[in-house]
Image: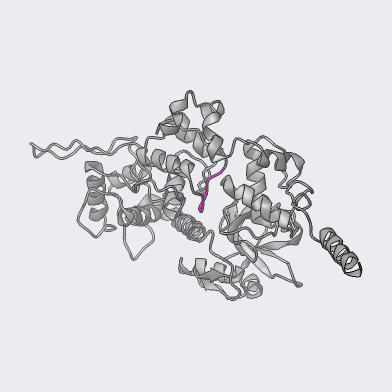
Amino acid sequence: MKKAVLTSTVATGLALAIPTVADAALGDQTLRQGMNHSDVTQLQDQLKSKGFFTYEQSTGYFGTITTQAVRDFQKANNLKVDGIAGPQTIGALKGNSSNSNNNSNNNSSSNNTSNASSNTSSSNVSYSGILRVGSRGNQVTQLQSQLRSAGFFNQNPTGYYGNDTREAVRSFQRSKNLTADGIAGPKTFGALNNTGAKAPAPTNQTNKNTNQASPAPSSSTVLRVGSRGAAVTDLQNQLKSVGVFNQNATGYYGNDTRDAVRKFQSANGLTADGIAGPKTFAKLGQGSTYNPGTNVKNETANNNSGSSNSGATVTNLIAEASKHIGVSYRWGGATPAGFDCSGFIQYVFKQQGINVPRTAASQYSAGQSVSSLQVGDVVFFETYKSGPSHNGIYIGNNQFIHSGTSTGVTITSMDNSYWKPRYLGAKRF
């Protein structure tokens, strides 16, 4: 009898101590930044299944990556965008929201998709959610197919959103005057669908049976990485004639051609984006030259050489920083194998030939104080101790890129509830 009572008592105690599935179910409480809970793990799993949470694994900690993933999901589902996972957000996640890859074909009204064949059409595709580095699935395959047909992606679709896809998205965004962040969201999808997203094709119809030179690029021609044909050959020959392209013309616009275009643009007061458009062709047609011993040879650009080179450096600086999005945080790390905040700053600037000190505090002391933020400035924050203890690179639109302890290299808003009150100021190198 005693044994039976004891067994019953123990069983009752265990039943009370062990939470049921319902006790731990997602939706029982509102989740927000700073929480560490098994419900957060379930939230991250749900967001990951829909392509919004792209960290390598669910952590159970509600940090800035999770906040941004919730915001992206809310925005895509016409919910209040506050980054807090409350009943409406969790209900949409657990229901048949428009962001599930399996349900994307049922949303015929989204993105102006007119019929069910849109899921196989390369000119008009129904997208949902946000795609970025780390995303996988059919929507990534569709995105890559559209980018490829438009001349921006030069590989077979893989269904995985890696660095090559990010760079293709950036190139497309730049061509449409969108924010070139390499993240495919509603505006990028809309531009792909609404305009056909065709990159101006290089001239491929060469005069095989004559000795006539191919015509000069038209005023509307735009050549970029992935372009092929006679127009690219002509461009390479022109770049070679001014001393920035040191190879035989191939007719293919690869990284070497892009770098040569950047060098020419930088030396002639143009935006150094590596894309050969009307302004670049016009400057080449004027006989502008490049002299390694000077910043600018062309007389009309002499007065702007400082600002043009500075602009090119900033462009390359942000491009270098963005290449490392997703790299994990590592205390004391200063290489792409892992960065801490100041190690990331030092590495990125070093790639542009700019040496900065190693620690956040010493970088704060070494930089020139600024009152008005510009892209490329280093922004500093006071976190676990008095004085500057964290920093990142300002990229515009009130955002900065940095290596956070819980996020690795990522892009974060300056208005973030954690970072805004801890902001100390900015320095320029």
In the rendered image, the residue lying farthest to the front is 1
**353 left or right, relative to 383:** left
Q: Quadrant of the N terminus?
A: bottom right
Q: Position of residue 72 (x, y in %)?
A: 63, 44
Q: Position of residue 154 (x, y in %)?
A: 34, 47
Whether residue 413 is visible: no
The front one of 334 and 295 is: 334
Q: Position of residue 165 (x, y in %)?
A: 43, 49
Residue at 56% from the left image edge and 43% from the top image edge: 130
Q: Considering the whole magenta stretch, tell me its main secondary structure.
A: loop
Residue at 56% from the left image edge and 59% from the top image edge: 56
Residue 232 quadrant: top left
Magenta span contains residue 132:
yes
Q: Position of residue 168 (x, y in %)?
A: 42, 47
The front one of 197 and 251 is: 197
Magenta span contains residue 34:
no
**78 left or right, relative to 197:** right
The coloring applied to the image is one colour
Q: Is residue 312 placed above or below 200 in the rendered structure?
A: below
Residue at 74% from the left image edge and 49% from the top image edge: 25
Q: Quadrant of the C terminus?
A: bottom right
Residue 421 quadrant: bottom right
The front one of 286 and 103 is: 103
| Range of residues picked out in magenta | 130-135
In the rendered image, the residue lying farthest to the top is 114
The front one of 309 and 358 is: 358
Whether residue 419 is visible: yes
